[in-house]
């Protein structure tokens, strides 16, 4: 057998692989946020018939004599450059204008440090909607992660400027609106829910005066309490267990049953606090009362939603209440083309992608802001966050709402590549045919 036959067969296989890549690109020409692939041809095995020589004092040198045996697949790469904006008119549809990915996954997924951020699935497809329980989800039912607005218990009505400034130092993220701060803990984003019909039993009616403390259908915001605690129980009194994390963890305590916003800050790294919270150990339960209306957990509130260029989800309820409920998180990797495609619109930041960092489009977070509301402590024995937990600025990234990112597959380019691939495949079949004809002549030399 001749080596030309094997070279041609290698060429046929490689051209067929390229045709598969082209076919996949054409099939996804209208797929939201699809990233076109390209295949790079690479020379295959070489054999050396004669080695090269630099020559001697008498004879001249010569170059190597080598014969190649066809082509092989060098690489199949993703083109992660942004696609064009395709308006849809849906309020929660959005597109990342620049480098980055949305972070989606299961509700119980914990993304509390730079070490476990790669648990999240990355996607460029921003076809978001609201599920029956108020969570913002993508088209496949995965919840969308972001940074939520939370109630700042350090804020005191009528406090002077010095007290407010001190409270902001405890919670360094940017103060967005009165009594609310932007948490830097990654959580599933959720819109306000609908309050139930007020009754005396559920605390919605003052038994003494008959006054309604809320009305049915009013928005109920999941923003009260510490973003660093986990709760259980009903919607008025919750039991919170301190999380075992190695940062300035906080929990909040109020006298059970009073319903008063008599919050006490508890620092887990110091073991300090006031009142009954002093000296509590890791994992101890803390009871606190929240003046929060009960709601139907199966039904999201009726509201109008919009997304601005920073990825802020703005909610306007039926009663006119309007607020930012949170910001969609944007993840960036060192090498965007190196992410691993896991199927559908999802990627993973695995080997080849580099470090994954998160933040908010437009640089909302100040420089030096860390995950989990961690602050750099200059006190002796204080906690200093790890550099990998530093949030990215992402000032060059914007979010465009009411539309989706179009596929980056270009039909004209793919058709041109398909013609070239077809002709390359055809030329390799000719080598097979010619080689077969030569072997036939060889066999027929002896009759």
Image (spheres, rainbow, N blue to C red):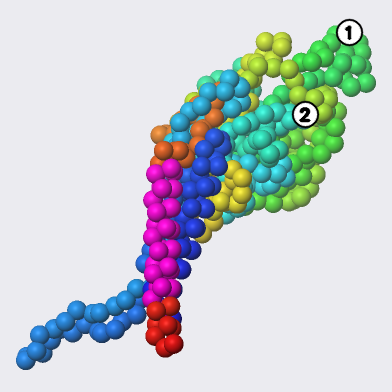
- Would you identify the image quadrant in which residue 260 lies? top right
SS at mark 1 in the image: loop
Tag 2 secondary structure: loop
Residue drawn at 51 percent across, 33 percent down? 406
Q: Which residue is mark 2?
A: 132
User: Which circle marks residue 209 in the picture?
Assistant: 1
Name the residue rendered at 39%, 82% in the picture: 442
Where does the magenta region start and end?
414-439
Q: Is residue 202 above or below residue 147?
A: above
* Circle 1 residues within 10 Å: few <14, some 14–19, many ≥20: few
Q: Tell me where residue 264 sits by quadrant.
A: top right
Point out the image quarter for the N terminus: bottom left
- By secondary structure, the bulk of the magenta-drawn segment is best described as helix
Which residue is at 85% across, 36% downward?
233
Residue 259 spot, x, y in % from top left: 81, 24
The answer to whether residue 282 is magenta is no
260 vs 101: above or below: above
User: Label 2, label 1: how many angstroms apart (C-alpha)?
Assistant: 35 Å
Q: Find residue 26 and report its horizontal and vertical position in percent.
A: 51, 42
> Where residue 248 sits in the image (x, y, percent)?
61, 45
Rendered residue at 57%/23% (across/down)? 88
Classify residue 400 as left or right of residue 194: left
Report the front residue among 192 and 120.
Answer: 120
């Amino acid at each position: 057998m001749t080596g030309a036959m094997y070279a041609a067969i290698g060429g046929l296989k490689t051209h067929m692989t390229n045709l598969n890549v082209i076919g996949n690109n054409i099939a996804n020409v209208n797929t939201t946020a699809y990233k076109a692939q390209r295949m790079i041809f690479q020379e295959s095995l070489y054999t050396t018939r004669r080695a090269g020589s630099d020559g001697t004092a008498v004879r001249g040198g010569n170059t190597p004599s080598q014969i190649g045996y066809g082509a092989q697949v060098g690489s199949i790469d993703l083109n992660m450059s942004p696609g064009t904006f395709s308006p849809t008119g849906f309020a929660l549809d959005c597109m990342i204008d620049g480098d980055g990915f949305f972070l989606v996954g299961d509700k119980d997924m914990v993304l509390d440090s730079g070490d476990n951020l790669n648990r999240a699935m990355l996607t460029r497809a921003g076809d978001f909607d609201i599920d029956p329980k108020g969570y913002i989800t993508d088209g496949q039912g995965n919840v969308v992660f972001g940074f939520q607005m939370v109630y700042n218990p350090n804020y005191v009505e009528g406090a002077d400027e010095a007290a407010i400034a001190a409270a902001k130092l405890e919670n360094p993220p940017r103060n967005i609106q009165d009594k609310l701060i932007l948490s830097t803990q990654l959580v599933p984003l959720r819109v306000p829910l609908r309050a139930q019909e007020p009754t005396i039993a559920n605390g919605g009616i003052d038994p003494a005066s008959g006054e309604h403390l809320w009305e049915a259908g009013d928005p109920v915001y999941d923003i009260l309490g510490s973003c660093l605690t986990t709760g259980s129980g009903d919607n008025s009194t919750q039991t919170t267990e301190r999380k075992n994390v190695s940062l300035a963890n906080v929990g909040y305590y109020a006298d059970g049953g009073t319903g008063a916003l008599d919050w006490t800050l508890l620092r887990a790294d110091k073991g300090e606090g006031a009142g009954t919270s002093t000296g509590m150990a890791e994992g101890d339960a803390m009871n606190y009362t929240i003046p929060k209306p009960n709601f139907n957990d199966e039904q999201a509130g009726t509201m109008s939603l919009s997304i601005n260029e920073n990825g802020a989800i703005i909610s306007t309820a039926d009663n006119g209440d309007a607020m930012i409920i949170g910001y969609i998180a944007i993840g960036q990797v060192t090498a965007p083309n190196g992410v691993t495609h896991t199927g559908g619109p999802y990627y993973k930041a695995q080997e080849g992608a580099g470090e994954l960092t998160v933040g908010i489009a437009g640089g909302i977070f100040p420089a030096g802001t860390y995950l989990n509301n961690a602050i750099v402590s200059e006190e002796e024995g204080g906690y200093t966050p790890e550099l990998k937990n530093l949030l990215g600025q992402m000032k060059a990234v914007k979010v465009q709402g009411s539309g989706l990112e179009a596929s980056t597959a270009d039909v004209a380019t793919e058709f041109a590549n398909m013609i070239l691939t077809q002709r390359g495949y055809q030329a390799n079949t000719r080598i097979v045919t010619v080689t077969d004809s030569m072997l036939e002549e060889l066999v027929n030399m002896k009759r």
